[in-house]
Every structure is written in structure tokens, then in C-alpha cells.
Image (cartoon, helix red, strand yellow):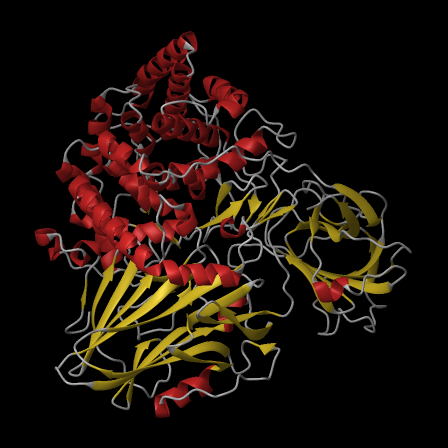
Amino acid sequence: MKTGFLISLAVAAIGLGQASAQIFRPPSVPLVTFDPYLSIWTAADHLTDRATQHWTARPHSLVSLIRVDGVAYRLMGLEPESVSPLPQTGLQVTPTRSIYDFANDKVHVTLTFMRPALPDDLDAMALPLSYITWQVSSADGQNHKVELYDSTSSQLVVNKNSEKVAWARETAGKLTALKVGTVEQNVLGSSGDDHRINWGYAYAAAASAQAKSALGADKALLDGFAADGSLPVTDDPRMPRAVNDEQPVLAFVFDLGQVAAKPVTRQVIVAYDEIYAIKYFGRKLLPYWRRHGATAASMLEKAARDYPKLARRCEKFDQQLTADATKIGGAQYAQMCALAYRQCACACGLAADANQQPLFFTKENTSNGDIATVDVFFPMDPQWLLFSPALAKATLVPILSYAASWHWKFPNAPHDLGTYPIARGTDDGGEGMPVEESGNMLILCDAVAQIDGNTRFVDPWWPQLTQWAKYLEQYGLDPENQLCTDDFMGKLAHNSNLSVKAILGLAAYGDLCQRRGDTAGAARYAQMAKADAAHWMQAAADGDHYRLAFDQPGTWSQKYNLVWDRILGLNVFPPEVAQTEVAYYKTKLQPYGLPLDSRKHLTKTDWTFWSATLAHHQADFGTLISPVYDYLNQTTARSPFVDLYETDDVHKDGMHARPVIGGVFIKMLTDRALWMQWAHADKNKVGPWAPLPEPPKIQEVIPTAQARPALWRYTTQKPAGDWSQPQFDASAWQEGPASFGTAGTPGAVVRTRWDTGDIWLRRQITLPDKPYTGLQFYVDHDEDVEIYVNGLPACQDAGFTTSYVTLDIQPAARALLKPNATVTLAVHCHQTEGGQNIDVGLANIVDSE
């Protein structure tokens, strides 16, 4: 840490006396956040040490400069390198704000990033923006001429910097709103983990009366302001152009005049209009904030108008949360809760269903990008069970509705719904975690019922809950060889911690029966759970602790699932089980945490907090979580709050920026009165939710291999750069019928073997003489696919499918697909592991909206 620079988190920020003595260096600080696409962080001690970045570590540049008496300084970002930084003197990270302080001998600047993530107000929570606010005052009692510069990069709207963008300006009430977006606008046209949004529009908005504005090249605007405080009087007309071609930015300049001791405040709102948020079983869902017809302009106007009251509410929320977290878990715990809160919120997308009800979708960041993964929102939901039961319900509804639909044919709960932001289901069963996900769903549904004091939320899906309880009754006590949520450790039979989840899932179902008035069912499942727990204690016992697996003496594991026995008041396991485990965990601590089990030194942060919450004594809780605090404070891996890392290597990175970090709030659920106080402060009235969208009718226009085989030219050797163009000579390529892949790949109709890493395909087609209003590609791909029409990018999709799916066609390519048109389809598919397949056709989708 550099001399004179103090970083302190929320406890210090809100003045909690002796608790504020903690000094903490966040590995990465949230700046502008909303969802997995608008998620900008700084991975540095000082805001001027590095360029700001998306959670995927790709640059998403936000820049700020200040001129004081004609001398320029940097406040945010690395550019221009010739400009020195204004010394940074402090940082406070609270649940909803990141607050930086800067000062020299002339001025003091407070720069605040605020997301109005107020859990009792879904309209505020749903705002796709963050406020950036400067407060400048004289530090020496003298007046100083001050000017501010702020810019937002067009990097925010592309997946790759080679994509072309265009820009414009709008008026939003008293605001000037600058916007930028890709030319292609392939809305919801792609998915994946290491993937950034390339549809919709980024906005930067500021008060027209206070700011000058310009849309132009990053370097030119920065150099001009640094030199003389100016901006060009006209916007850069050279568009569209690629982001890596003289990077276009949205810039504002504020002339504060002569600044004295009284602070002068200016503000920029950075927002993102996705247009549509989620593709949900063929239907494009609006962002929740758009559900009543709001536009970007009206949203920005209202956001500016509401800022003063939102800021007051955010400050109050931060104070209350941090005080309660400190009381429950101590100062270090409160600091980590503050760092976790916005990360959890911005790893999810909030959409509105056909009834304008909220659906809250997790994205499995730094993993495989899955959407609505049950074993991801299970560890996440303590944050929302505590602060927003409405959002906890909104995470459960998509899985409950899917499981009740014709899609799902299995006796256990689903694992996920696809790859973010496209929820199309996993009708083949997907990644199998049958005991894991069934137990997760029963436990969460019971937690919601305990908050509500009734089962009205879960009643529409009671048959599914009953089915999952019967599944656990048969298969849960001694799980077969299968994955659990810790799938990175591989399959494990006789998993004792997974058995705990099944037992508590059965007890939770019994509690739900009791709340429904089914006393016989309640008694049956309560007795069953207690009997299973007694059996578990014998089968898992290993002297001074309990085993990793029933058949593996000399092993151990965190029994984090046990925490729900106490939280839900199920009282299935004797208290000494938890205390035996906690005492043993203290003997297994590594320098930076408690390993997940005896196999490796790898750990999960969320599960560590759950295991620590088993402790009955505050000192033991602190002992188990303190190494996590040390890892965050010392790691050289400057990622957002990591939830998977090596406990003996402070330099290694791990899974990060994930919603599961909301699991740190589980400790606060152990104080029943506090839990219900927070949960009942959520006045959002939600439901009834719309049923799962009916599947569209698919009429094949250019048939796939399902209907009849089509001949394609193909090669597995990388071709010349113009391979997708109509004039390219592919006569030397091989020819074969679709589809192309390996036998046994789920959903594939393989007629030509392809077993290499890449394949390139070409085929000329002629469309029928009919107009098709719902034309889409109809594709089965394993894995990543790119499709071109006459050389124009038409579609891309990451990951793999296990059946044929419809994919939107980009507008420019779609314009070529007219009745009677003859065009060249060109396809590239990339494979990494497992089964593989590629087949492409065209279909007309009826009633897809």
C-alpha cells in the first residue's frame, strides 16, 4: 500500500466507532454495476493505477480528469499518461456505494459511485444504471478555478473491439443523453460466459445546464481537455467505426468556476438499455424497468429527478445493514458483506414476465455462463431471503415453472435453464445433480414459506415439491455416484454432506406440509428426517469429526448444508454434530481459509461462511472467516470477490464476480428476529406469475438433418480469410451430408463424421417463393457456432445444445433472405471436449413473441 493512502470499507465509512479500526484493501472495487453486462470494476488500490474493466477483465474504460487553476490531474483511469494523478486519500466501500477521496494542497474531491440497489424497492433496484458524483471543495481556504472531465467508452457495447458502433445524442428532460451502440444490434443473439453484450445502447447523461458534451475519439478529447479544458464544438462524424479505431467515447466537461470551501457537486449517470433482457423459451422478455412502457429517456429523466431521495435511502440502508452485520458477525464480517452486496446483485438479470412480474436470473460467471442454475441461486439466496423475499421468489419461479411444464420429464429438480441470457431449458436433463438440486429447491421453498407465514407462493407447484421429496426419500440418504454443487471436485458416491442436504430437504418438505395443514405428512417426514439423521451420524462418524463419504475413513469435509437445520428450526441433527465439526475445522485451517475437504486445499468462500455459521460462539465464527478476509486483503489476483480459490496460495485467482457470494449473508439469518425484521421490510407485492411461454410452431423452410440430409462442402483445415464469401472457391473441400459430428452426441443426427477441433461448412440455398415473417436459423451445435450469409455475419452462439434450437438472424443478413433468393450459407463450429455436432437449417417461427 502506498504511503498516505488508507482504504477502509463500510464499517469505517459509516462511523461505527471502534469497529472502524479495520484497514482493508478490496482486491477489486465495484464502480458502475447493474447486471452481468453492465459490471465495471477497478482492480487496483488507486483509481488511477489501472484502466477500469468489465468483470471478465476486458477494458470497459471510464475516465475522469480535473483541472485546478489550469493544471490537469487524473481522477480515474490511466490516460493521458502525461497527466499526473491527484493523490488519492481514501476509499470507502459500502453495500450500495464506492466512495473515493482525493486531495492536494488546493482542493478536495469526493468521487462516489452509487447503484440504488434498494431491496425493498424493485423499481429502484431495476434501474439499469449507476450514478457518478463529484463533490469538489477548496482545501486551503482560497478560491480555485476547477473543471471536470468524464468519459464513458464505447467498449461497453461490444463483445470484441473490432465491432462497429454508431452514436447519437438525445434529450431526457433537463439532461443531455449521449448514447452509443453496435451497428448490427443482434438483440439476444449470442450467449456465453466470457461474453459481453453487443446489443442495446450505453448512455451517459448529465444536466444540460451544467455540462458541455461531445462524442468523439478518446485521445483527442482527453488531450484537448488536459491542454485547455475544452471539448470540440461538434461531434465526430466518422461513423460507424470499430471501437479499436480511435476509440469513440461519450464525454462531458463541467466548468465549476471558482470553487471555495462550500462543496460544488456535479453528476453523470451511466446507464444501459438492453432493449430486451432475457430470451425465455422463445419469448423476449423486457427488462423489469421497461415493463410499463418506459423509454431510456424517461428512465434517465426520472432517475435524475429521484437521485436526492435515493441517495438518502442508500446511505440509510448502508448504515443499517453494516451496523447489523457488525453486531452479528463482527467488523471483518461487515466489511465482507459490504463488498459482496453489489457483486451478488449485478451477477443477475431482472426481467418482467407476461404478467409484468419479476423474474430474476443468475448468470454462472467464470464457469460456463449457465442461466438460472439452482446450485448457484441456492448459495446466493441468503442475500435475498434476508433483504428481498420478492427477488428470492423471482429466482425460484423459472425453475418451478419449467419443472411443471411438458419440457421436464425427470423426477428430480432441474439444474439450469441454458446459457445466459437465453433460457431454453435442458430437456435432456442437463448437468445431472439430482439430489443436490431437489434438496436445494425444497429448502429454499420452505425458507420463503417461513417468511410469508404460509405456503401460498409454493402451492401452485406443490406436485413438483412432493415429487422431489419422494425422490430424496428414495435416493437421498446414501447418494449414488453423482455430482453435487462442488462439481469441480468430480463425482462422489456416499457423499455425507450431500446426504445432509437430502435429509434437511425432507425435513423442509415436512415443515411445508405442516404449514399446509397436512399434519400426517408433516409427522411422517419429520420422523423420517430424524431417523435418517441418526443413521447418518453412525455412518459418517470418524472419531472427532464426520467423513467426506460414508465409505472413506480418515477423510473429512465441510458440512455446510447443516446450517439450514438451525436457520429453519428443523432440529433434525443434535447440536453437538455442528460443534464437533467446527472444532475439527479449526484444526484444518490453512493460511487463507478452510479447505472444502480433505482431497485438496481448494475452498469455496460461500461454503466457508456457511460452515462458520455452524459455530455457537462468535470467536469460532471469526476464526473461520478471518483467513478469507486475509486472502481478500492480500491477494495479488485482483478480481471481484472470489468464491473459489486455493487456501495456501495468495497469488492464485479463482471463480469470481459470481452471485453465490450472496451466501455470506447467511450468518444474519441465524438471528430470527433480525431476519424477519429485514425480510418484512420488503413491501414489494409480487405474483401471480405468468405460465411458462408456450412453445412456438416451427416450420422448417430449409430443412435440417432431422427432415432430410443436405449436402455441404466442408473442411477441417482453416481456410483463407474470404471463405464465407459467395465467390470463394470451395471445390477442393470435401462433400458430405449433414449433420457433422460424432456418434452418441445428444440430439445429433450424424451422417458425416467430424472429430477435430474445428469445421468449416458451405452450402448454397434458394429460399421458397414465400414471405416468412418469423425466419430464424434452426441449429443443433456442439460447441460454438458462427453463421454467415453471403459473407455477412448472421448469427453466433456459444456453448452447446442437445436439441435443435432457433437462433435470431442479424438484420443485415436477414435482409438477404428474401423469397426466391439464392445465397451462400457458411458455418464455422469450434469444439473443445466431449460430444460434437453441427447442423444448420432455416425455419419460420410462428407465435414466437
Q: Is residue 60 left or right of residue 137?
A: right
Examine the rendering and report whether any part of residue 732 can be seen: yes
Q: Is residue 491 left or right of residue 117?
A: right
Count of residue discs: 0
> In the figure, is residue 239 to the left or right of 75?
right
Q: Is residue 556 above or below residue 111?
A: above
The quadrant of the image that shows the N terminus is bottom left
Q: Residue furthest left?
A: 18
**As drawn, is 365 to the left or to the right of 134?**
right
Nearest the viewer among 647 and 728 is 728
Residue 592 in view:
no
Q: Position of residue 263 (x, y in %)?
A: 21, 73
The structure residue drawn at horizontal position 54% and vertical position 78%, both measured from the top left corner, is: 244
Q: Residue at x 70, y 41 (%)?
A: 747
Q: In terms of depth relative to the viewer, which is nearer, 542 or 323?
A: 323
Answer above or below: position of 443 versus 285.
above
Please tell me which residue is depicted at 88% across the width and 59% down the height of the picture: 819
Q: Position of residue 311 (x, y in %)?
A: 30, 57
Closer to us: 532 or 272:
272
Q: Position of residue 713 (x, y in %)?
A: 82, 61
Q: Nearer the viewer, residue 415 or 134?
A: 134
Q: Position of residue 323 (x, y in %)?
A: 18, 46
Q: Residue furthest top?
A: 520
Q: Quadrant of residue 784?
A: bottom right
* Quadrant in the rendering for residue 635: bottom left
Query: Which of the 4 image quarters holds residue 29?
Result: bottom left
